Image: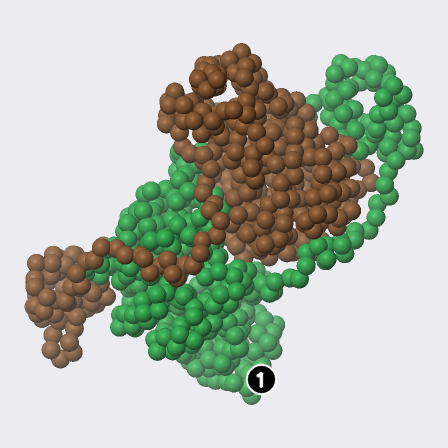
Chain colours: A green, B brown
Amino acid sequence: MSQSSSDRIVASLQAWIAAAPAGTRLPSTRALVAEYEVSPVTVQRALRTLVAQGEIETRPGVGTFVREVRAARPHDFGWQTAALGPAGRRTSLPSALRTPPNDAVALHSGYPDRELLPERLVRAALRRAAQGESAFARPPVAGIPDLQAWFAAEVGRSTTRGSMPPTAGDVAILPGSQTGLTSLFRGLVGRGRPLLVESPTYWGAMLAAAQTGVEPVPVASGPDGPDPEELDRAFARTGARVFYAQPTFANPTGAQWSTDLAERVLAVVRAHGAFLIEDDWAHDFAIDTEPNPLVARDDGGHVVYIRSLTKSVAPSIRVAGLIARGPAKDRILSDAQAQSMYVSGVLQAAALDVVTQPAWSSHLRSLRGQLASRRDLLLAGVREHVRQAQVTAVPKGGLNLWLRLPDTVDLARLVADCEARGVLIGAGDEWFPAEAPGRFTRLNYSGPNPGAYPEAMRVLGDCLGDQA
Amino acid sequence: MSQSSSDRIVASLQAWIAAAPAGTRLPSTRALVAEYEVSPVTVQRALRTLVAQGEIETRPGVGTFVREVRAARPHDFGWQTAALGPAGRRTSLPSALRTPPNDAVALHSGYPDRELLPERLVRAALRRAAQGESAFARPPVAGIPDLQAWFAAEVGRSTTRGSMPPTAGDVAILPGSQTGLTSLFRGLVGRGRPLLVESPTYWGAMLAAAQTGVEPVPVASGPDGPDPEELDRAFARTGARVFYAQPTFANPTGAQWSTDLAERVLAVVRAHGAFLIEDDWAHDFAIDTEPNPLVARDDGGHVVYIRSLTKSVAPSIRVAGLIARGPAKDRILSDAQAQSMYVSGVLQAAALDVVTQPAWSSHLRSLRGQLASRRDLLLAGVREHVRQAQVTAVPKGGLNLWLRLPDTVDLARLVADCEARGVLIGAGDEWFPAEAPGRFTRLNYSGPNPGAYPEAMRVLGDCLGDQA
């Protein structure tokens, strides 16, 4: 603990012991006191440390001796296999989390490049948080009240006439949406029970489903969203009571549900006495339309809403807001609390600081323009160089272009061929909870170096051509 | 999103709509363009927003109308009861998390007062982190390598002769020990399976056990730790394969296992092909002896080790290090990653900065002195004023004094009586996984205002006297 004279003696004796055969008797305390010119207390402390380390052993009334050393064995952890029992489903992390080589064009990742983040705002907010109360206060388990209120107000802005907007008390602050999803799946669904999910859908949700042991049941979701009648049948067939969806700029398809579809899906959910988990991941990534969360259309407690700030503010700001009402909220919160107790006050304070600055609005306006240019540049590249691909829809928001490729394509080979030529793309299979109904690729237009998009699309087109 | 002229029109029309009967026709776009002196595009955007909000509806070819308003209903979440199904075990938060009134003497909490934390160090570290790379980098899922290495080196210092110290690669950084415990219980034990725990033990572990559905089986643990023979019988009887323990300054008893006991417990654990989860929560709160983690005595992968920095560094630094080897590590990591993806880089960088400053060692030395004085002051108060209580042991580290009270005491009444007189104490029952074998109270000596300890102990003694 301290670099004291006792530590000095320990270090010196360790060297001495290392050179001595097991069973060698140590010099007496008196001799060590003389040798190191320290007090007997200091020598005793050093000896206690060496005993604790297993270096020496004291035989009362006899003396202190270098201990018999167990020979170093090669590690054998085979015994763990029986102790651990069968593994659950594999939950390996998808390629979206891979860190690419520096010179590659990374279209596979889901995280926006730094130039799209409000860096100056975030650094200033973190600096202020470093000086503020939040660094040394334990925040309430449901979060800092002003941040709860902000999440509620953001939804309140789009609350429909005649329905009661959520209040700050309906909001819980969580350490990111991944934690939120696992708590939601455990709290609302439960191990072994079915969970309806869009197909394709966000891989993080499938990871959370695998880890919590819920059974994802795919409901096809196209460029306009899911078909309410198919959803209705899936609820009836499986007895599911929860549907997980991204109604605004879904990952990967970019679909935004129309007002009409939103109402029809809500009607189905209500009719089945079920929950809709609305993952509003792309709230801050609108391009052509406004986000319009479904939770604002529901005051019956059917929609449970989660929105993370990590992607739009900064990777280090692991903060999400969850909105839920009724007993469901208690169920989820109790899981989240047992899970993580509370969210770092510094991160909450910094997040609140960022999103309440006037510069946050102007950042979002400028971000909108940047995302539009990037999307259009990538689209132009696809249309010029990847004529084999079908653009399923031009996304009105979000970070991804979802391309359908010819059914004959060997996707693994395509991904490898592109990578060999410095272009990383996402294999569409990773976004399907079951068998993929075709060959797809997800191209993320928020990564570094958008200037290389045309060339990258030329590469993709060439690699597809090689398979023709 | 933007405080634009479109927003201005939305606000103005909302007021107009609120005053208009349902079905009223809105002025034409042309009229609105003239009225607000904006472009048709801006008016269209405002109308789209109002449609999305459910305020108005457009009938193609006819016009735009104020929408029929659903009457606001009182909330009825009764339908959720069926959808949620039976609740798991209650996992209410214990009194240790209560925020006391400002003028109370808070002996019930488990969190050190700010004056015991390295405030200057932490604020400087957070400021540096706010400027550094970590704010905008997504760290590796297992953590920042230098921080992994630091946790490994801390244990390596006490590694016994002939055993291989853990390496940085054996360490995973987690967002606090609570997250670690839930991942450990899910990964190593599994729902419905038995988990041996010391009795009494840390309530956060019991909370994690309840939430993960593992079945805690108490093994009595006194002022010197558990009895290895009883542990052996518990393993044999239950078929458990995991024992959760705090061998160093256990919460609440303060017990530190001797080297001999550590070896005997490890022998039992090895003999049963089992894991020991070592929760080294008080590593930084040594007073009279040095911490001496068991994980340093085991290179067979039997000890899985977790150490949080939250209590000793700052409440906002939610960072813990987990050490595990063999397939167990993969099992735990896969759960932790599905759970929280990664730990905020800012928090990891700040934690690493703090613990690698030379001032950290001097802080720990001074902390040791402060804890010693506080403990001794509280002890003196107990011995003078609470003669009815038995000090089970003088803790050599940690933050708590564990007192046995007469068996006739009504604990709930005692806690209430003390609170009425401004003294908050912990009801011992909360630390027992099953029935408490007697009446206990935990007094934490790391809270604010230690000067009030003598008076607080007088109050405790009086309240006990009232029950005589």
- Placement of the N terminus of chain A among the 4 image quadrants: top right
Q: Is residue B313 above or below residue A357?
A: above
Where is residue A197 shown, x and y percent of the image?
44, 69
Which amino acid, mark 1? Asp
Q: Is residue A225 above or below residue B299?
A: below
- Placement of the C terminus of chain A among the 4 image quadrants: bottom right
Residue at the location (41% across, 59% down)?
Answer: B84
Residue at the location (57% across, 29% down)?
Answer: B438
Q: Is residue B434 visible?
A: yes
Q: Is residue A156 visible?
A: no
Position of A22 with respect to B69 (left or right) is right
Where is residue A317 shown, x and y percent of the image?
44, 49
Residue at the location (55% across, 60% down)?
Answer: A211
SS assignment at label 1: helix
Q: Is residue B377 above or below residue A451?
A: above
Position of B73 with respect to A61 (left or right) is left
Where is residue B422, by image quadrant? Answer: top left
Where is residue B243, by image quadrant? Answer: top right
Residue linked to disc 1 = A466
Q: Foreground residue, B174 or A133?
A: B174
Residue at the location (73% across, 26% down)?
Answer: A7
Where is residue A218 shown, x and y percent of the image?
46, 73
